[in-house]
Amino acid sequence: MNPPPLSSQRTLKRVAPLSVGKVLALLYGALGLIFVPVFLCMSVLTANMPTAQRGIFALVGTGMSLAMPLFYAAMGFIFGVISAAIYNVAAKWVGGIEVEVE
């Protein structure tokens, strides 16, 4: 006798907020790396500027190239945790998201 087939429909009723936060921190940090070449080019292009203006633009370009991936990762973590917590509350009200698995 064969067991009854399992349904391929599943309902996602809860997600772990810290898990979602960690994954989004990694993804958003990687997306922040896209901006590194842009800000480094900004620093290099300041070589043709007058000396009085060159320093601040070079500093901003270099500083932003270092800060953007960290800032994006931090924001990804924070908003990932908040979004997962909001999803958990909403899923209690409406029953979650139905997904089909195989």
Image: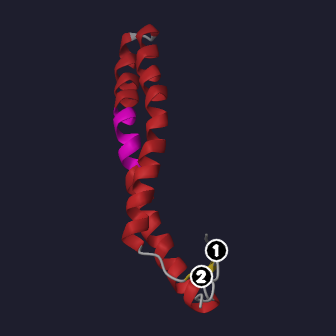
In space, the residues marked 2 and 1 are separated at their CA atoms by 6 Å
Task: Identify the residue position indicated by label 1 in the image.
Answer: 99
Q: Quadrant of residue 57?
A: top left
Question: Is the N terminus in the top left, top right, bottom left or bottom right quadrant?
Answer: bottom right
Residue 93, quarter of picture: bottom right
Q: Nearer the viewer, residue 83 or 26?
A: 26
Assign a secondary structure to mark 2.
strand
In the rendered image, residue 98, in percent from the top left (x then y), is placed at 65, 78
Q: Residue furthest top?
A: 48
Judge whether residue 64 is colored magenta.
Answer: yes
Question: In the rendered view, would you say 71 is above or below 83?
Answer: above
Which label's residue is closer to the chain start, 2 or 1?
Answer: 2
**Residue 16 got which mark?**
none
At which x and y percent is residue 11? 59, 82
**What scheme was used to colour the molecule?**
secondary structure
Q: Main secondary structure of the magenta part?
A: helix
Vertical arrangement, residue 8 with respect to residue 52, above or below:
below
Amino acid marked by disc 2: Thr
How many other residues sit within 10 Å of disc 1, few (<14), some (14-19) or many (≥20)?
A: few
Residue 40 at what x, y percent from top left? 42, 24
Residue at position x 46%, y 26% from top? 37
Q: Residue at x 37, y 16 (%)?
A: 52
Provide the residue span drawn in magenta. 63-72
The residue that appears at 37% across and 55% down in the rendered structure is: 74
**Residues at circles 2 and 1 in contact by the CB criterion of under 8 Å:** yes
Density class for disc 2 (Cα within 10 Å; few <14, some 14-19, many ≥20) is few
Name the amino acid type tagged 1. Val
Report the side of 43 relative to 96 (left or right). Answer: left
Q: Position of residue 61 (x, y in %)?
A: 40, 28
According to the picture, the residue beneath numbered tag 2 turns out to be 11
Badge 1 element? strand
